[in-house]
Image: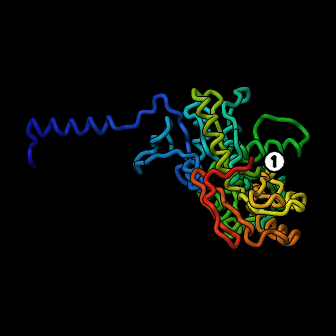
């Protein structure tokens, strides 16, 4: 084995010291926790991109410093995000309502909650459900009282069965549950097949996995979506406000398209009933003809095809040379999308007045 001389040893020590110095400093930065994997991760990343938070992540690290803002992105599990925000370790986080509910359910009475949900992110819909074998004897939730239930949501499940047992006995009790709640991570749906439990409480999206496991839902503990949560004790309230508003804007812009068309003044009333906008449509006079106006209105993306058809069918007198034009809003750099017969503008600054 070759021996290192004094100079070589100094070089190695210098390299090791430099590697240590490269560890990210979080001092003074707003800490924003996002899921490191799972069903919420990709859409959460899209929201950060839409909010103009630019960063490069080392795959070996769970911390990435933003390149254009005084923010650090912290990659955690969805469950750890709720507790980290609740304990004030990070300022903002994206997680599921189920994980927020689980964190709050495990807090001791009187502690109070130091985390609050500030924005429904409108993705990641699922249900936390009580599931039992399709061919088993359990047909309703009270049939599971006194039996074993497996779940990764021990706090919410305990709270659910405590309330259920109180309803059945008509007495309030904070004592020992008759129902055994067993904590299990991972493939909870296999617990009944392995005879570890009589029923389970787990997250369900389409229900296909539960059906394949021979299970059926008999009750819903809660419905859940992704939410933006914040610490009540953040040291960066202004940055929290700014990026909460940015994310809110990204969500709104992705739900709507900008519908633009020219129409005769006689049909303004009928047209604006079809495309009323979020508050009101923008109407401006055309320079070439005082009898015609340009209408711009924000229309929900899911109803745009119906709105376009109604305008054409109900009015039918739009200028043939200025066919209905639609522009898709996609922040931070919106691009045009023409659904009419003519080209569309970029719409980068399009907004409803």
Q: Which residue is drawn at 57% across and 42% down?
A: 80
Residue 83 position in % (x across, y down) = 61, 37
* Observer able to see residue 130: no
Which residue bears the numbered disc 1?
279
Residue 122 position in % (x across, y down) = 70, 52
The image quadrant of residue 10 is top left
Taking 174 as reference, is 248 above or below it? below
Q: Which residue is drawn at 47% across and 40% down?
A: 68
Q: Residue at x 55, y 41 (%)?
A: 33
In the depicted view, which residue is nearer to us: 90 or 141? 90
Badge 1 element: loop
Q: What color scheme is it?
A: rainbow
The image quadrant of residue 245 is top right
* Observer able to see residue 28: yes
The image quadrant of residue 115 is top right
In the depicted view, which residue is nearer to us: 244 or 340? 340
Label 1 Cα neighbours within 10 Å, binned few <14 / some 14-19 / many ≥20: few
Q: Residue at x 40, y 37 (%)?
A: 24
Horizontally, is 8 left or right of 110 in the view?
left
Residue 196 position in % (x across, y down) = 65, 57
Residue 16 position in % (x across, y down) = 25, 38
| Count of marks, rendered view | 1
In the depicted view, which residue is nearer to us: 257 or 209? 257
Horizontally, is 306 left or right of 188 in the view?
right
Horizontally, is 18 left or right of 10 in the view?
right
């Amino acid at each position: 084995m070759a021996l290192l001389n004094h100079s070589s040893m100094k070089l190695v020590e210098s390299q090791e010291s430099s590697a240590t110095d490269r560890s990210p400093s979080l001092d003074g930065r707003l800490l924003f926790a996002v899921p490191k994997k799972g069903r919420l991760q990709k859409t959460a990343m899209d929201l950060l991109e839409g909010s103009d938070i630019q960063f490069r992540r080392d795959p070996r690290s769970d911390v990435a410093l933003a390149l254009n803002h005084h923010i650090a992105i912290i990659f955690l599990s969805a469950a750890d995000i709720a507790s980290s925000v609740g304990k004030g370790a990070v300022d903002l986080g994206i997680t599921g309502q189920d994980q927020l509910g689980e964190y709050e359910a495990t807090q001791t009475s009187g502690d109070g909650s130091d985390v609050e949900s500030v924005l429904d992110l409108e993705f990641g819909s699922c249900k936390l459900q009580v599931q039992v074998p399709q061919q088993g004897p359990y047909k309703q939730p009270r049939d599971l009282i006194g039996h074993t239930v497996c779940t990764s949501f021990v706090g919410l499940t305990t709270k659910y069965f405590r309330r259920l047992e109180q309803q059945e006995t008509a007495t309030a009790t904070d004592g020992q549950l008759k129902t055994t709640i067993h904590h299990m991570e991972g493939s909870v749906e296999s617990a009944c097949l392995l005879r570890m439990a009589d029923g389970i409480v787990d997250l369900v999206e389409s229900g296909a996995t539960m059906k394949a496991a021979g299970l059926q839902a008999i009750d819903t503990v809660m419905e859940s979506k992704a939410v933006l949560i914040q610490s009540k004790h953040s040291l960066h309230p202004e940055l929290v406000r700014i990026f909460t508003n940015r994310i809110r804007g990204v969500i709104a812009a992705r739900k709507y398209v900008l519908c633009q068309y020219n129409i005769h003044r006689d049909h303004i009333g009928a047209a604006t009933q079809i495309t009323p906008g979020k508050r009101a449509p923008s109407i401006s006079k055309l320079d070439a003809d005082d009898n015609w106006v340009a209408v711009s209105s924000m229309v929900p993306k899911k109803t745009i095809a119906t709105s376009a058809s109604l305008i054409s069918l109900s009015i039918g007198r739009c200028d043939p040379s200025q066919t209905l034009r639609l522009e898709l809003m996609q922040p931070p750099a919106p691009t045009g999308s023409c659904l009419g017969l003519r080209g569309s503008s970029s719409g980068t600054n399009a907004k409803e007045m």
